[in-house]
Image (cartoon, grey):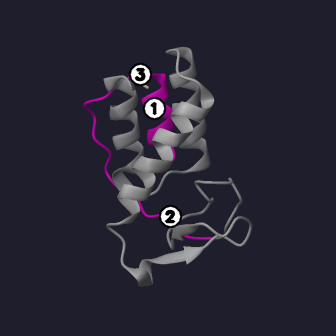
């Protein structure tokens, strides 16, 4: 599986706040499919990237999704794995502006 630099950049942008929302995942998957990756390939890539990013959380910053049981950040409002809605308060972060495009704008709107 060859993931393009654009998909890598979108993933890094989405994980800036250490959270991959369901909307961010959908946007990246749609873009990757248009680039020729399969749904399975891009979802595996995103799961690996998210797992690596979650390592930066302490145990106290994580909770379990009540729907799928995945470990997710306390600040999540949706499970990045199954899309289950969770009530929470989102933090506002400044996003990098080096990546542009409609897909990057969708991801930035999730902050």
Q: Residue at x 35, y 33 (%)?
A: 8
Depth check, front residue: 36 or 90: 36
Q: Residue at x 56, y 39 (%)?
A: 43
Q: Quadrant of residue 1?
A: top left
> Up-down: is 49 above or below 77?
above
In magenta stretch: residue 103: yes
Where is residue 46 shown, x and y percent of the image?
A: 48, 43
**Location of mark 3 (residue):** 101
Question: Gap in Å between the C-alphas at discs 3 and 1?
Answer: 6 Å
Magenta region, mostly helix, strand or loop? loop
Where is residue 106 shown, x and y percent of the image?
A: 51, 34
Callout 3 touching callout 1 (CB < 8 Å) = yes
**Residue count near mark 2 (Cα–Cα under 10 Å), binned few <14, some 14–19, many ≥20:** few
First of labels 3, 2 by sequence position: 2
**Location of mark 2 (residue):** 90
Depth check, front residue: 49 or 31: 49
Where is residue 64 shown, x and y percent of the image?
A: 60, 74
Identify the magenta region.
88-111
Depth check, front residue: 44 or 58: 44
**Residue count near mark 1 (Cα–Cα under 10 Å), binned few <14, some 14–19, many ≥20:** few
> Up-down: is 25 above or below 34?
below
Q: Residue at x 43, y 78 (%)?
A: 61
Depth check, front residue: 89 or 36: 36
**Location of mark 1 (residue):** 105
Q: Quadrant of residue 80?
A: bottom right
- As drawn, the label of residue 80 is none
First of labels 1, 2 by sequence position: 2
Q: Residue at x 57, y 21 (%)?
A: 33
> Up-down: is 59 above or below 14?
below
């Amino acid at each position: 599986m060859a993931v393009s630099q654009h998909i890598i950049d979108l993933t890094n942008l989405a994980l800036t706040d250490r959270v991959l929302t369901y909307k961010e995942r959908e946007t990246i998957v749609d873009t990757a499919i248009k680039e020729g990756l399969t749904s399975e390939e891009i979802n595996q890539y995103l799961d690996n990237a998210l797992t690596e990013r979650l390592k930066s959380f302490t145990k106290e910053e994580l909770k379990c999704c009540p729907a799928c049981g995945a470990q997710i950040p306390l600040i999540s409002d949706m499970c990045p794995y199954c899309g289950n809605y969770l009530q929470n308060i989102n933090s506002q972060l400044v996003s990098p502006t080096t990546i542009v495009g409609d897909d990057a704008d969708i991801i930035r709107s999730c902050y």
